[in-house]
Every structure is written in C-alpha cells, then in structure tokens.
Image: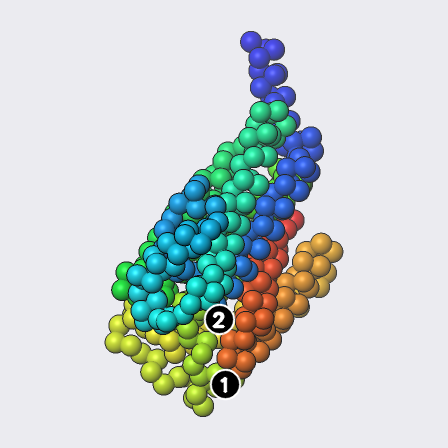
C-alpha cells in the first residue's frame, strides 16, 4: 500500500516536472497554427474576390479532387449558374472567369483539409508511440474536435449564400472566422504550455486579468471585423477620422438591436473603429505600466503595441483605399498576428 502511494505521488510529480514538457509537440502545434493563419488569409482573399460561393457542394473527401476534364468543369459551372450569386452578381461570366473563382475557394478548402491532416497524422503518431505527455492528450483531442467543427461551420456559412442571397450571412461569416481564430489562439496557447511544461505557480496579480481581458477584446475586434467584411461596410464612409463627415454616422440605427449591431453597415464600421481606439489606448497603458516588470513580459507587451499600431494604420489605409485587396489581406493577417501576441501576453502574464 505504501509502495502504491509512493508510485502515485511520483506520477503526480512527473506531470509538473520539466520532463513533462515536450518541445517537439510544441513545434508541431505552432506549425499547425501557422497553417491555420495561412487558411485565414486565403479565406480573406476568397471572400474579397467573391469566390466563396463558387463551389456549391460540400464533399469533405471527394471534393479534394478538382474538375479534371472539360465535362467536369462544365458540370461545376452549371451548378454555379443555378446559384443566387450568379443571377444577382455574376450573370454572363464565362468559364474562364468561373475557374478563377473556383480555384480560390478550392484552395481554401484544400488548406482546411491539409490542416486536418497536419494535426491528425502526428497526433495519432504521438499517441501510438506514447511520446506525448499525458496532460496534453485531452487538450489536443479537443483541438482536433474543434477543427472538425470548423469544417461543418464553414459549410453552414456557405449554405446561407446559396439560398436566395448573393453573399453569405454576416453573422455566419463572423462565426466561421471566430471559430478559426479561436482554434488558432488555442493552438498557440497549448504550444506554449507544451514548450514550457505545466506551471507550478501562477501569477495572482492584476497582470493576469489585464492579459486575459486584452486578448478577449482583440478576439472581439476580429469578430467585429468579420461583420464589417460580411456587410461590405468598409466600402461606405471611406473617410477618417470622421464617418461621412460626422462623428456618429448617418443611418446608424436600423430599428432594432440585431439589425443595427449585426447588419447595420454604418453601425458595424463605427463599432469596429471605436474598439480599435480602445485597444490602442489599452495597449499603450499596458506598455507604460510594464516598466519594472519581468523582461519577458515587457518584451511581449512591446510587440503587442507595435502590432496594434500597425493594425490601426492598416485599417485606416484599407478604408481609404476602398478595400484594396493587398491592404485588406495585410489587415486580416496582422489581426491574426495581433491575436497570437495577445494570447502570448495572456499566457505570459498568467505564468509570471
């Protein structure tokens, strides 16, 4: 009985010892996070080019093979010509133009499949060889399930644009992007945990709360950006710092909370701007407060501030350019980078 008690105690100590960490698992998780980042950027290009509805079916396995001959291309094009987007926006385009749309969406879906394979394959290998610390198994299993859910949500979003609409529903776009970014942040957090190992102690001061709140606000700002994109609100009131020459834009209220906050073009852009100003002020406050804090924390906060300033500049430039594709993609990519840094800040603040 004493021997059993000692064995259990030893196993518990092993879960918190440096040996319980796994640098190779951490590198794998960071690599998958990079693929998710690439998928977010390609997804942004797919939306901006109006390509997201060019594939009207969801075939998780067979859909990985694109049309390989003239007959297959004709069938795919015929299905697209029966969609609402074709009749309302792209009526009359030829097969060549359709192929451009198709390849963007097919590339986006292919990246999603690659993310799944890049996660599932090594995960199974780690389990088979028992080379993953036990405390990481459940977390990585949850990440795998989250990735599968993302595929279902993506099709749920696309379906909203095939039923009497020329574009997907903004709230479904926000859900799809939000889930992808949540997975991205969770991969980074878990990767940091795998790299450093479980913490024996966690900080109990105000930095923990500040880091978590800041990361949550960055995530919320990303969702607001998705609503701006889904409503094409970046194409109106393309002036700054005012909106159409006004502080509060004309047409802000749309007669109800849901209509205003989810579908009001002026409202969603206005809210996106306000939160951007708030995040900039928050980041600068953290930078001022960080004097005298541990060097790692100060470094992360400095990087966060740089990313926030860059994001604000990119947002203004994207707006003034009437959503030029290169600027819009940089704006979306930097938003994900900012979320990664905010996640790292929350993790570092919690660890001390």
Q: Secondary structure at mark 1?
A: loop
At which x and y percent is residue 10? 63, 21
| Crowding near the residue tagged with mark 1, few <14, some 14–19, many ≥20 C-alpha atoms within 10 Å | some
At which x and y percent is residue 178? 45, 56
**Residue that badge 1 annotates:** 239
**Image quarter in which the N terminus is found:** top right
At which x and y percent is residue 222? 49, 63
With respect to residue 169, does 321 lie above or below?
below
Residue 210: image tag: none
Query: Quarter-wise, where is residue 342 in the image?
Result: bottom right
| Total marks placed | 2
Query: Quarter-wise, where is residue 294 in the image?
Result: bottom right
Q: Residue at x 50, y 45 (%)?
A: 113
Depth check, front residue: 107 or 78: 78
Q: Residue at x 44, y 54 (%)?
A: 70
Of circles 1 and 2, the one toward us is: 1
Could you tell whether 240 is left or right of 167 in the image?
A: right
- Is residue 88 at all visible to an observer of this figure? yes
With respect to residue 283, does 135 lie above or below?
above
At which x and y percent is residue 21? 66, 35
With respect to residue 56, does 331 lie above or below?
below
Could you tell whether 70 is left or right of 314 in the image?
A: left
Q: Residue at x 63, y 63 (%)?
A: 304
Q: Are marks 1 and 2 in contact (CB under 8 Å)?
A: no
- Is residue 155 at all visible to an observer of this figure? no
**Residue that badge 2 annotates:** 275
């Amino acid at each position: 009985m004493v021997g059993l008690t000692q064995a259990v105690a030893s196993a518990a100590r092993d879960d918190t010892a440096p040996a319980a960490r796994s640098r190779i698992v951490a590198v794998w998780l960071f690599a998958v996070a990079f693929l998710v980042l690439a998928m977010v950027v390609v997804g942004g290009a797919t939306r901006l080019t109006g390509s997201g509805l060019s594939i009207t079916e969801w075939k998780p396995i067979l859909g990985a093979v694109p049309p390989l001959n003239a007959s297959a291309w004709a069938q795919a094009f015929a299905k697209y010509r029966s969609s609402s987007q074709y009749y309302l926006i792209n009526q009359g385009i030829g097969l060549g133009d359709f192929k451009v749309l198709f390849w963007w969406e097919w590339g986006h879906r292919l990246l999603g499949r690659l993310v799944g394979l890049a996660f599932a394959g090594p995960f199974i290998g780690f389990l088979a060889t028992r080379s993953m610390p036990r405390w990481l198994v459940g977390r990585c299993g949850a990440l795998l399930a989250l990735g599968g859910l993302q595929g279902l949500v993506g099709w749920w979003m696309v379906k909203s644009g095939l039923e009497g609409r020329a574009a997907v529903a903004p709230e479904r776009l926000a859900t799809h992007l939000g889930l992808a970014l949540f997975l991205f942040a969770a991969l980074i957090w878990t990767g940091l945990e795998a790299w450093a190992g479980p913490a024996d102690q966690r900080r109990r001061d105000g930095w923990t709360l500040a880091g978590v709140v800041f990361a949550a606000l960055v995530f919320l700002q990303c969702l607001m950006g998705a609503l701006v994109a889904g409503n094409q609100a970046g194409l109106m009131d393309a002036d700054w710092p005012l909106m159409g020459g006004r502080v509060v834009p004309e047409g802000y209220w749309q007669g109800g909370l849901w209509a205003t906050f989810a579908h009001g073009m002026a409202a969603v852009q206005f809210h996106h701007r306000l939160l951007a100003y708030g995040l900039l002020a928050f980041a600068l406050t953290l930078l001022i407060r960080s004097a005298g804090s541990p060097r790692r924390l100060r470094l992360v906060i400095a990087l966060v501030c740089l990313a926030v300033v860059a994001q604000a500049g990119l947002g203004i430039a994207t707006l003034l350019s009437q959503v030029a594709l290169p600027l819009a993609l940089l704006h979306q990519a930097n938003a994900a980078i900012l979320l990664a840094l905010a996640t790292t800040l929350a993790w570092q603040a919690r660890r001390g």
